[in-house]
Image (cartoon, grey):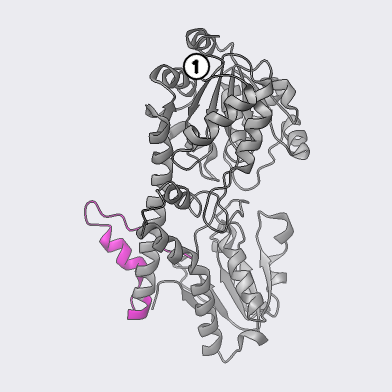
Amino acid sequence: MSLQELSEKISGKTATIAVIGLGYVGLPLAACLADVGFMVLGVDRKQERVAVINQGKNPIGGKEPGLDELLKKTVSARYLRATTDYQQLRDCDVVFINVETPVEEDHKPSYQALRSVLKALGPVLKKGALVIVESTISPGTMKNIVLPDLEKSADGKLGHDFYLGNCPERVMPGRLLANIHSMQRAIGGADEQTAQTMALIYKQFVNADLDLTDWVTAELVKTVENAYRDVQIAFANEIAILCADLGADVWKVRELVNKTPYRNVHKPGAGVGGHCIPKDPWLLASSLSESKELSLIPAARAINDSMPEHVFTLLEKGLSTLGKMLKDSRILILGYAYLENSDDDRNSPSELFARRLMDGGCSFSIHDPFIERYQGDIYHMAKDCDALVLMTAHDQYRDLDLKIMRQVMRTPLIIDGRNAFADLTDLHGFEIICLGKG
């Protein structure tokens, strides 16, 4: 099958599409493709996830506007189904790959999941099929890993037996469908015709710019974007520490600075989590030749990784002010997901903070309304606690009844790592220490 023939099948929506990896990226993508009329096969290694999806249900927790309804609609209409069996990919014309690409402790990328997919996909890949990698990868990965691995497993050649491109995902939990529809995409193709063919698919459901480019530029765009955010957040966190030391309010400083044109100070906070920002700067840095060394990106990563420790210091000082010792105190951590109103706990700052409490010999528990193992009555869990430490600004926490909370807690202390209680007028006797406020 030539690219021209594939393009005609895509335009007529007779192309069969597969999406490998049905997580935060792959599942909404599969649903969107099915919603515009493609027959879509989702592939995931988790049998329980596949079973839930085939029931038309959403395995992703948290608030994801529209996703529940879209999955029910597309599965019921039989445009979307899921499987664990790669053999069912034999008739697929287009294959999207959306699997994790973490970094190891030495900050080097781990492509175990990606390489495993490429190894399994090759033997069943239809001749003339188009493979699109949406996973975020280090610059150079398409050329140095994806292409040779796929040529080996498929026993074929690029441009003759299959076509290959990359288009890094652009989604965030809580806004999965909105991001898919509205975010610009950098479409990297092995050549211009491949990129144009890829664009025919994306224009079916993306209402934003589709910029055609090459593999390495697309790889760079995504990793640079998240490294930029990481650096900006690190700057905000450092300013927050400085403001508190001077007795100022970083949130007021931020507001006034951002009134100046072309200024956009990001929000400081108790830590940076998720699958992308803690990882992607290292993916970018790992592409640099060994003879060169970066300074800013590693420094930003160190600052952001240190924020749970900073919150721990605020807690210690707050307890001391109220005549309490950390080791004699009981703490309730509010939020374990890295992002508000989500169940995504990958690289959660709360995990680092909890580990620090454990090292300090402190008794603690964790509450999160979106993560099953941490759910429960928050007021019951706060009984006889000496401090609440807000790590994630879930809506539920902004609506806490502090009058009831004051009645059940032993010590009236709140450490606010996200400025969630800024608008409170009646503190009901609580001492609230907010990150970035003196």
Does 150 appear in magenta?
no
Image coordinates for residue 127, horizontal then vertical, percent: 61, 14
Residue 66 visible in the snapshot: no
Q: In which quarter of the image is residue 186?
A: top left
266 is higher (above) or lower (below) than 111: below
In the displayed structure image, the side of residue 266 where residue 381 appears, left or right? right
Q: Observer-nearest residue: 219 or 186? A: 219
Does 256 appear in magenta?
yes
Image coordinates for residue 83, horizontal then vertical, percent: 74, 29
In the displayed structure image, the side of residue 403 where residue 244 appears, left or right? left
Q: Observer-nearest residue: 278 or 76? A: 278
414 is higher (above) or lower (below) than 374: below
- Callout 1: SS: loop
Image coordinates for residue 202, horizontal then vertical, percent: 47, 24
Q: Observer-nearest residue: 229 or 262? A: 229
Residue 159 visible in the snapshot: yes
Image coordinates for residue 164, horizontal then vertical, percent: 51, 24
Q: Give, as a single range, the part of the protein colored magenta.
A: 244-269
User: Which part of the image, by quadrant, shows the N terminus?
Assistant: top right
Q: Quadrant of residue 331?
A: bottom right
Q: At 42% from the left edge and 60% from the top edge, which residue is drawn?
A: 298
Q: In which quarter of the image is residue 362?
A: bottom right
Count of numbered circles on the image: 1
User: Which part of the image, by quadrant, shows the C terminus?
Assistant: bottom left
Taking the view exactly as shown, the residue that stands out farthest to the left is 261
Going by the numbered disc 1, the residue's amino acid type is: Gly
Q: At 33% from the left edge and 76% from the top edge, which residue is drawn?
A: 248
